[in-house]
Image (spheres, rainbow, N blue to C red):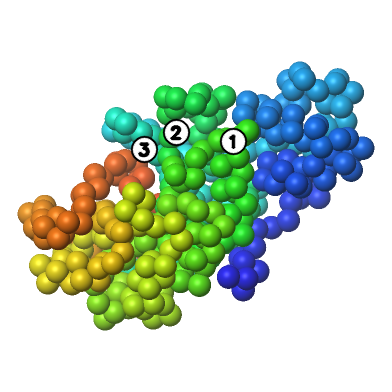
Amino acid sequence: MNHHAEAFAPPQEDRDEKRNLVGLTRDQLVAEMAGLGEKPFRAKQLWHWIYHRGVTDFAAMTTLSKDFRARLAETFAVRRPAVGEAQVSRDGTRKWLLRLADGNEVETVYIPEEDRGTLCVSSQVGCTLTCKFCHTGTQRLVRNLAPAEIVGQIMVARDDLGEWPAPAEGRQITNIVLMGMGEPLYNYDNVAAAIKIAMDPEGLSVSKRKITLSTSGVVPEMERCGRELDVNLAVSLHATSDDVRDRIMPINKKYPLKMLLDACRSYPGTHNARRITFEYVMLKGVNDSEEDARRLVKLLKGIPAKVNLIPFNPWPGSFFESSEPAVITRFADILSAAHISAPVRATRGDDILAACGQLKSASERRKKAERETTLPAQL
Ligand code: SAH
Ligand code: SF4
């Protein structure tokens, strides 16, 4: 989506700042080293220090000559986004508020579970898509994140969890999901660059099988995502008729259900062992009837699918309610009877506003609170 990328491009780095090596592809790093008169082997060594060892200070990169380290430090830096605030939920979920170089903020969430640890990464500041149930969609300011700002989220989490170098077995961060703020397929190029860096076996080394990209249904970008990145796909479905989906997810007017499900049917690399996850937020009286469940079964015919049922997570000012537990169970049973796996996703980290759909930068929340407290009394 080039028009999106252009309209919401990340700002160029400050000219006074040293160039950040984080976020460059391997080829770009080789080119930068060639500019210093160095062989491609130097780029390989640097890559190891930056992405395997997590080192940010050139002086500590002891396999490089002292002279080379000094020359690197003159021109370059290895930078992360600054951590504005780090919160830990009573259930162990962590949330980092990251402050970007231009003052914008995004959030990253870590969800530890018994058998895995999932890092939920943002792809944009805010989101242009205004889904009615989503807090991020109410944030007015939107821009794409640069590759360094996306990869930087993983690096900040590894810093905090003390996971450098990451072991092959028994890692704390095992999975990465692009399910934070923003629509990743509206920032395809930067997200793709970041995912390729994350997958590099000599660096962050996260397997493509452990990476899931979630989209609200940007149909024209889905095939390319599967072909070029081959990551797991999650699709935010949330309704079983165009009528309801149009109302709660405006993108449906552009790419309606049939188009979306056809794109799922042909998503490269999908088979029974690697299903597409359909996310379905349970909204009381909106999309949670037994008829909806039966319609969902029909819609998913022919797609290797599983469904994640997500109880609606409220946020300040939201006007939906979550379906009752019994209604969710009934919905899940109808799917299960049709041999569709339909786990109910546990709500995690809601005491720190870290659950699905609750992310919105704290500064935006503060601004909104200020507006509300200055409203005239008669309102
Ligand atoms: N923009 C992408 C990535 C965000 S993923 C997408 O929409 O798929 C975040 C997931 O949480 C999406 O499935 C989203 O629909 C869901 N979600 C949004 N608001 C929510 C809420 N209030 N409660 C529960 N889930 C919500
Ligand atoms: Fe954007 Fe996804 Fe939220 Fe919709 S659900 S507003 S696409 S982040």
Sequence-earlier tag: 2 or 1: 2
Query: Which of 135/285 is in front?
Result: 285
Which element carries disc 1, helix, strand or loop? loop
Going by the numbered disc 2, the residue's amino acid type is Ile
Looking at the rendered image, the quarter that the C terminus falls into is bottom left
Q: Which mark is residue 111?
A: 3
Residue 180 picture location, percent across and down: 44, 51
Of marks 2 and 3, the one in the foreground: 2
Of marks 2 and 1, the one in the foreground: 1
Alpha-carbon neighbours of circle 2 within 10 Å: few (<14), some, or many (≥20)? many
Asked if residue 107 shows in the view, the reply is no
User: Considering only vertical position in the picture, is 296 above or below 82?
Assistant: below
Sequence-earlier tag: 1 or 3: 3
Residue 7 picture location, percent across and down: 62, 70
The image quarter in which residue 351 lies: top left
Sequence-earlier tag: 2 or 3: 3
The image quarter in which residue 89 lies: top left
User: Considering only vertical position in the picture, is 114 above or below 344?
Assistant: above
